[in-house]
Image (cartoon, rainbow, N blue to C red):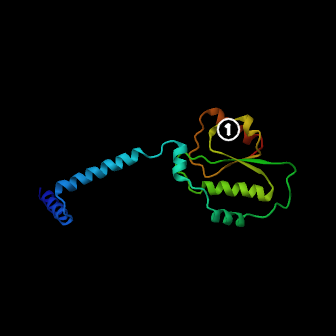
């Protein structure tokens, strides 16, 4: 009982210093709680919404720095054209560097003339027919990959078992 009285006295003192009554202070707390709950409900829910809210493309300056850091042309040219699929979807934490990594991987293949790069963030790319077009699949900062069905997982496993990577 004494602790409650002391807390109320301290709260009343702060309220009087701020020029508001204790009841007004209490109402502000409820308003803040409601605002937090409302803001929480407005959080992006789908992958597309979360990616749009979290990911920002690299700036021109960042792109220049990435290009400068890349190795030069490949000393040995591949005997045939190669293609890489870069998959960049995240189901949990979304790394803000994903678009930077995508840009880097695309530029690296282009500058080295070693591969052409395609980018995907949809699980529908994981079919045997589509994966047959690629020499490699690169997972760029993915988290908690959640295939939509077993056939997609099996397609990737078959791709790797066939000797591709």
Residue under the point 26% across and 50% down: 30
Where residue 18 sits, quadrant-wise, is bottom left
Nearer to the camera, 6 or 125: 125
User: In this picture, is 141 found above or below 130?
Assistant: below
| Mark 1: few/some/many CA within 10 Å (<14, 14-19, 20+) | many
Residue 21 in the image, given as x and y percentages of width and height: 16, 58
| 39 lies left or right of 2 | right
Quadrant location of the N terminus in the rendered image: bottom left
State the residue at coordinates (76%, 55%): 109
From the viewer's perspective, is residue 129 above or below residue 19?
above
In percent of the image, x 15 and y 57: which residue is there?
4
Which residue lies at the image location 77% right of the left edge and 59% below the top edge? 111
- Count of labels shown? 1
Position of residue 73 relative to residue 92, above or below, is below
In the drawing, does residue 149 fall left or right of residue 21? Answer: right
Q: Tell me the SS state at disc 1.
A: loop
Circle 1 residue: 126
Q: Position of residue 161 (x, y in %)?
A: 74, 40
In the image, 61 versus 151, the foreground residue is: 61
- Where does the image place residue 61, in percent across and percent down from the top left? 64, 66
Taking the view exactly as shown, the residue that stands out farthest to the right is: 79
* Residue 101: x %, y % from top left: 65, 56
Say which quarter of the image contains residue 74. Answer: bottom right
Quadrant assignment, res 132? top right
């Amino acid at each position: 009982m004494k602790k409650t009285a002391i807390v109320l006295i301290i709260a009343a003192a702060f309220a009087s210093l701020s020029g508001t009554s204790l009841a007004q202070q209490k109402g502000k707390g409820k308003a803040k709680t409601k605002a937090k709950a409302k803001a929480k409900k407005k959080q992006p829910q789908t992958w597309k919404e979360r990616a749009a809210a979290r990911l920002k493309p690299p700036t021109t300056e960042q792109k220049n720095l990435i290009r400068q850091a890349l190795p030069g042309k490949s000393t040995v040219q591949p005997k045939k054209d190669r293609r890489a699929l870069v998959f960049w979807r995240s189901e949990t934490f979304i790394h803000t560097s994903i678009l930077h990594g995508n840009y880097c991987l695309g530029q690296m293949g282009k500058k080295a003339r070693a591969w052409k790069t395609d980018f995907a963030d949809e699980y529908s790319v994981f079919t045997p027919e589509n994966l047959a077009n690629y020499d490699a699949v690169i997972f760029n900062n993915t988290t908690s990959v959640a295939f939509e069905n077993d056939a997609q997982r099996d397609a990737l496993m078959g791709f790797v078992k066939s000797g591709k990577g």
